């Protein structure tokens, strides 16, 4: 007689075969009723809408949003392709957000389809999809990213609402800055005779310093007999940070957000009180609080650690290939890795206390911290040495967060810009707050980003004259909420206030 475990294994094998085909959104017809019901009962499958499912995990709490947020874009692409075939695309505004690297899950996804029903489809966790009946642009003005059909950047800029320039200035300026040639816009503007839109785009391009492109569009439209009145659609100060060198919208968006947020940081984050300039005393204090720091940082990530465990694994009696049975687990390996990384970070702290540029120090040492953090897992055979080589090479998601980190291809562009921004930033407060925020926002590694982000924060704290600061596990929800506000709503003040409240009161 086949046991329940064997039956569940058969159902999991059926689900695995679908996933190996790259399927995230699973239709009821793709699984037998027996497999589907068994997987639903045991928490390996979650219903989205009638007839559609996504994989889940049985260890998630009821009502947990993680499975939905991590599957959202794949599900929408599959659902829309099944429902409308090739006869759909996302709205110009949503297209621009995605082109700029803003993959935050929206509360309502607006879809254009020639056979749209102008109705709302309710989705999990207070999200929804609205398919509006629209005549679609020619196929040459549609691009595809991750199976999502989007307006191309030029066509989205032409057809988006004027209000979008005010509602999402960072993303709009990022894609404007990524335009390579004015002909991308002119082809559409001249073809349709869009004089008002041409005036708006000329003003927008001039706003970000693309003078030659603005002039080319203006003069070409005029030469074709169109009267164009230039109009700047933005209601904020012009930017000066963008480079003339061709860069991706992801890079431009990072630069723009840094510039946009830095004034709020300087307004709301406290200036450091004078600390002792004695490096030995500073490092002695760091050593004294190690156990507390490790406990809180590891606990924030969900590891079940105790001060006793931390003290045991930091001793010299450590061999992950021949370790006591009660320590050969993920918690112990994480604790040992934290200890090894902490020693590497202390060397970086010494360098910045000796007045080396903190951005250069972090750029040079960051990968070493990462390798030390996971070295015990490599020694134990859980990870391969190649797993610690470079940045992540696949998508990664943050539990319970609507923020979706950029695709791995963009990480290799973003990290050099991230280091450059820290190197060039003159205000210590901005380096600390934005350094930590943007590192975890980019999420360059498959794992360990939170711990390394807090290490990075404390190196920058030391460079700025602040004490080593611990984020208590009791404040985890407030910590994540503040990061979510910065990632999803681009409001950095809550994170400033949170970090300011965590700064140690033991000023020397």
Image (spheres, rainbow, N blue to C red):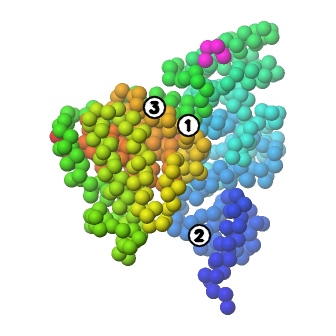
Instruction: Identify which residue, 194 or 153, lies in the foreground.
Output: 153
Which residue does the image show at 54% across and 46% down from the upper left? 405
Look at mark 3 in the image and give the residue it sits on.
420
Confirm whether the magenta stretch covers residue 452: no
Q: Quadrant of residue 227?
A: top right
Which residue does the image show at 41% across and 36% down from the upper left? 434
Classify 10 Å Cα crowding around label 1: few (below 14), some (14-19), many (20 and above): some
Mark 3–mark 2 CB contact (< 8 Å): no
Q: Residues in magenta?
A: 210-214
| Nearer the camera: disc 2 or disc 1 | 1
Instruction: Identify which residue, 144 or 62, lies in the foreground.
Output: 144
In the picture, which quadrant includes the N terminus? bottom right
Lower sequence index among marks 2 and 1: 2
Q: Is residue 102 visible to the viewer in this orientation of the structure?
A: no
For label 3, the SS is: helix
- What's the distance in space between the residues labelled 3 and 2, CA to CA? 45 Å
For label 2, the SS is: loop
Magenta segment main secondary structure: helix
Mark 2–mark 1 CB contact (< 8 Å): no
193 up-or-down from 413: above or below: above
In the picture, which quadrant includes the C terminus? top left
Image coords of residue 461 (percent x, y): 31, 39
Look at mark 2 in the image and give the residue it sits on.
43
- What's the distance in space between the residues labelled 2 and 1, CA to CA? 38 Å
Which residue does the image show at 37% across and 66% down from the upper left? 332
Look at mark 1 in the image and give the residue it sits on.
413
Of all residues shown, which one is farthest toward the bottom?
1
């Amino acid at each position: 007689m086949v046991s329940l475990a064997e039956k569940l294994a058969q159902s999991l094998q059926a689900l695995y075969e679908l996933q190996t085909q790259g399927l995230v959104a699973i239709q009821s017809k793709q699984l037998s009723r027996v497999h589907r019901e068994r997987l639903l009962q045991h928490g390996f499958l979650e219903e989205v809408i009638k007839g559609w499912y996504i994989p889940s995990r049985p260890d998630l709490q009821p009502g947990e949003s993680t499975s939905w947020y991590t599957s959202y874009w794949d599900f929408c692409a599959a659902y829309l392709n099944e429902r409308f075939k090739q006869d759909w695309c996302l709205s110009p505004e949503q297209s621009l957000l995605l082109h700029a690297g803003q993959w935050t899950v929206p509360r309502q996804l607006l879809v254009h389809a020639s056979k749209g029903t102008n109705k709302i489809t309710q989705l999990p966790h207070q999200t929804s999809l609205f398919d509006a009946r629209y005549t679609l642009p020619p196929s040459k003005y549609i691009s595809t990213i991750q199976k999502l059909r989007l307006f191309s950047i030029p066509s989205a800029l032409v057809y988006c609402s004027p209000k979008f320039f005010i509602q999402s200035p960072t993303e709009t300026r990022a894609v404007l800055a990524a335009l390579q040639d004015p002909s991308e816009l002119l082809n559409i503007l001249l073809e349709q005779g869009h004089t008002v839109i041409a005036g708006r785009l000329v003003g927008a391009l001039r706003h970000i310093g693309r003078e030659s492109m603005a002039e080319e569009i203006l003069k070409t439209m005029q030469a074709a007999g169109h009267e164009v009145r230039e109009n700047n659609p933005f209601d904020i100060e012009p930017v000066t940070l963008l480079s003339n060198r061709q860069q991706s919208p992801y890079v431009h968006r990072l630069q723009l957000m840094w510039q946009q947020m830095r004034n709020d940081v300087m307004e709301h984050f406290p200036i450091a009180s004078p600390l002792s300039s004695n490096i030995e005393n500073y490092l002695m204090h760091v050593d004294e609080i190690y156990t507390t720091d490790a406990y809180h940082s590891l606990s924030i990530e969900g590891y079940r650690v105790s001060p006793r465990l931390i003290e045991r694994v930091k001793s010299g009696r450590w061999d992950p290939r021949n370790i006591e049975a009660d320590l050969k687990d993920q918690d112990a390996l994480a604790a040992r890795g934290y200890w090894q990384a902490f020693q590497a970070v202390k060397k970086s702290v010494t360098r910045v206390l000796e007045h080396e540029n903190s951005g250069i120090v972090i750029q040079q040492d960051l990968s070493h911290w990462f390798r030390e953090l996971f070295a015990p897992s490599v020694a134990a055979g859980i990870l391969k040495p190649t797993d610690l080589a470079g940045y992540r090479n696949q998508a990664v998601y943050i539990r319970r967060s609507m923020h979706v980190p950029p695709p791995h291809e963009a990480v290799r562009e973003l990290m050099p810009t991230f280091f450059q921004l820290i190197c060039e930033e003159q205000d210590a407060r901005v380096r600390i707050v934005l350094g930590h925020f943007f590192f975890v926002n980019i999420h360059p590694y498959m794992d360990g980003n939170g711990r390394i982000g807090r290490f990075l924060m404390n190196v920058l704290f030391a460079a700025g004259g602040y004490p080593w600061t611990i984020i208590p596990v009791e404040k985890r929800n407030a910590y994540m909420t503040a990061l979510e506000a910065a990632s999803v709503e681009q409001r950095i003040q809550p994170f400033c206030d949170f970090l300011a409240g965590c700064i140690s009161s033991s000023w020397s």
